[in-house]
Amino acid sequence: MKRLILLTILYFILSYKAEAQITLSHNVGDDTIETNMFSCTSAYQYWARKFVLNEFGISKNEELIINKGSVAITDTWGTPTLQFNIYKIDSNFPLSFDKKELIGSSQVEPIYDSFIRNGKSKIITINFNTPITIPSDVEIILVEIHKGILWGDGSAFIGGTVSDNDNSWYRGCAGDSSGIYKTTDELWPSPNSNINFYITVNGEAKTIFPFQITNDNNCENKSNNFSLTNQAEIKSVVWNFDDPSSGANNTSTSNDISHQFSSPGIYNVTATVIHIDNTSYTIPQEIEIFEAPNINKNVSLKQCDNSDIDGFSFFNLNEVKEKIIANPDDYTITFHEEKVDAENGSSEITNITNYKNKQVSIDKIWARVENTNGCYEISEVDLFVSTTEIPAILLKEYYQCDDGTNTTDGIATFDFSDITNDIINIFPLNQQLEITYYRNEEDALAEENAIADITNYQNIGYPNQQNIYIRVDSKVDNDCLGLGAHISLNVEKMPIANPVIVNPECDNDRDGVFSFDTSTIQSTIIGNQTNVTVTYFDENDVELSSPLPNPFITASQKITAKIENINSKDLDGKCSDTTVIEFIVNAVPIANTIAAQEECDTDFDGLVGFNTTTIESEIIGSQTNLIVRYFDENNVELSSPLPNPFYSASQTVKVRLENPIYDVCFEETSVEFIVRAKPTVNLISEDIICMTNNSNLEIKVDNPNANFSYTWRDENGTIIGNSATANIQKGGVYKVIATSQYGCNSEEEQITINESSISSITINDIEVQDDSDNNFIKINTDNLGLGDYEFRLLDKNGTILFDYQNEPYFENLEGGVYNLEVNDKNNCGSIPFEIALISFPNFFTPNGDRNNDFWQIKGIDKSYYKSGTISIFNRYGKQITTFTIDDIGWDGTYNGKQMIANDYWFQAILIDQKDNVKNRKGNFSLLRQ
């Protein structure tokens, strides 16, 4: 153990010298500062340092393995990226710079939040995921840092140190326009000469020996052949195998030497070589020697002859592996027909689970056992073929009905465990036997896929019939003692109880039973099968007659029909199948009748929203779980239940109650939806009543309907009539409603009765102007009465002077007596009124012809003037006569003598009904003709 520790220490010392840590840098110290070096936004930049490798102690027989690099960054904008690129260059750099001379690159690293400034910089180190190896023939390298962009501006400001000992190189944006590398001093002379880049790389220098140790084996059971490369340059060599237990064989001075290590383990082999130039090299080589498999060199495998008994059989070579070595699964074991093939690992046997011997009864093959380290041993395997000891006449048959989810696939479940004792009894008592069962001969010979449970075996893959192979092996040495097909499994066909569909029936007489036709049931169950019988059982498992009686009178029940194979040999019972025949007697619902649904139309459209709230419950009554369907007069199905309200014209809706289980069992009723017409009333809008002491007006409905009743009401809502007519005594608004014989009311109609009357004109309503140039009559209409009046004027002889007019005014009238008629336009009548207009005639002719024989004031009337006197004077003022308004007038005489024709004067003093005195004087002429 002490020897191994010392050798290990020595090995690490040698390794350390061979792989010394190297730092390439031209910066003095690691105290980085902010420089005046700019950065470009959205552009690439390249900062670089040149290193001559021998200046850093790297010799020509050493290669440099660079594993990390560092750069100083003052600030960043956005997210820039950094990547180290290592190029091979020469003394003509930068003119000779060629990107094709790239030796290797680091991964690209993004730089986040590197703000330092304040005159300082931050050193960022990138550990290379893949180290870059500088070959030993490279003398000068360029370490370039590529500043890229990940996001945003991607700017980065490189830092430096206060002093350095070589140039800093730059190319990229704002550099030389040709893209060639220039020093910072060339690009930006003083005062910016302090621009330098902090760029360093670290790695290991590894010596490249001119000689290498080779060997061809690492297994303890084989010799290891050692040699050195480049033997033409070897002057002498001394080998040390680090194996003292090998005695004198532990060292050697031969260029090529064979050494077998004494035990497994790790050996630090060295070769001390003197080069032909007298340089001495000690070349180390760590050698690990592994154990070889510990095997039985010679084993045997016995197999029973198969059914042809010819000395040839099939071997499962896996069976012999445990005889060769313990835990065989930890090794790679191959079999070969020739030993040399086993040694070379070639021409291995491929069908190791079904290998047939090549020599009758006795044969030989070789097994190669190899561990994970490639070390192997060879074992000789002897193959023997023996004859079975189980009598060939032994054959036990088993019968089982086809079972499982598919009873027509020829697959059944068998229990053939009882044969095991039969096999045991063939062999001597207390012999240790391994009895296994297989689906086929191939599995039995290969001892693969043994049947795990012989009490619950299904002949899957061998429908209808299968031979089971029995294999008997010795538990002592696994020798085969017997093998053969001694079990016959027979799957009996299951009869099929064809399903029978019996149409459900309706219990139309509601007695709970129905007479079913069973004439085709038995033939349907059997179909074209033969050698079968059918039995029937009711729901209480009571056997019924077979075939079933026809008709079969029953309530709803399920009958089980069982069909059996009469030739079945299944010890568990004859193969059979069952089907269930369902006889269903469905109840027929009772559809209760309901009264017609009558509603009055409200808007003359013939549609009414019927209240259907209780319709369905009235039809169903106490029945439950029924399907209720509604159909209109066109047999179009309506929603169920009916919508509420149900808007409909008059129609008959069919209602069907169905048994939800069997909808052909139903009963129907109908619901009459009757929309009663809305009555109409025709009534004039206005009429006139003539008001008198016993006023009366009959108001009535136009074209009354004899089937309607009518209700008249006055403005106070008091009923004033119950027929098509009503008598009223005054004006007002009167309303009537018609009600049909179905109780439907019309819209309320109304009539406005306007009051009118015959005129009640009096003298006070008359204004006249007479004895003027324009005599007129004017009627004041304010107090004439209730009516709408018109006026006409007649003379005293009844001659119409002015026919009816609305204007209560007549003008340009002569003196005289007139009849004024005031007529009510509403036909309440007219009333005459006599009016006198006085005038004083200019002359008269008292000649006895009865025409103008007297001089008198025209139009004088007692109704206007209650008294008056007229005095006549001659031209000299002498009073001739005096008379009153009641007299006929002056006849032209004086004391019985006719007065001469001449002009005369009059003086009239008139007193009207209001005691107004009218005094008038004038003259007139008396003419004699």
Image (tube, rainbow, N blue to C red):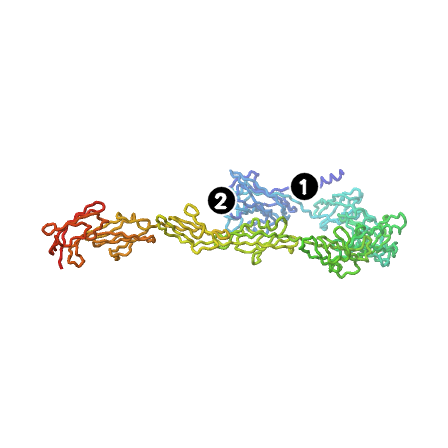
Q: Is residue 298 visible?
A: no
Q: Position of residue 240 (x, y in %)?
A: 76, 44
Q: Residue furthest bottom?
A: 528
Q: Nearer the viewer, residue 312 or 481?
A: 481
Q: Residues within 10 Å of mark 2 (few under 14, many from 20)?
A: few
User: Which of the two labelled residues, at mark 1 and mark 2, occupies the earlier sequence position?
Assistant: 1
Q: Badge 1 local density, few (<14 within 10 Å), some, or many (20+)? A: some
Q: Which residue is mark 1?
A: 16
Quadrant where the C terminus is found in the figure: bottom left
Report whether 402 appears left or right of 626. Answer: right
Residue 336, image x and y in percent?
A: 80, 54
The amino acid at mark 2 is Pro
Q: Quadrant of the N terminus?
A: top right
CB atoms of marks 1 and 2 within 8 Å = no
On screen, residue 874 versus residue 653, left or right, reads left
Nearest the eye: 447 or 737? 737
Q: Is residue 622 left or right of residue 675?
A: right
In the image, 722 versus 638, the foreground residue is 722
Q: For mark 2, give the secondary structure.
A: loop
Is the residue 548 above or below the residue 268 in the image? Answer: below
Q: Secondary structure at mark 1?
A: helix
Please state which amino acid type lies under the numbered disc 1. Tyr
Q: Is residue 7 above or below residue 727?
A: above
Question: What is the distance, in whole Å, between disc 1 and disc 2 at their CAs?
Answer: 45 Å
Q: Which mark is residue 189?
A: 2
- Residue 408 in the image: x percent, y percent? 75, 57
Give the residue at the far right of this rendering.
Answer: 428
Which dot marks residue 86? none
- Total marks placed: 2
Is residue 204 visible in this depiction of the protein? yes
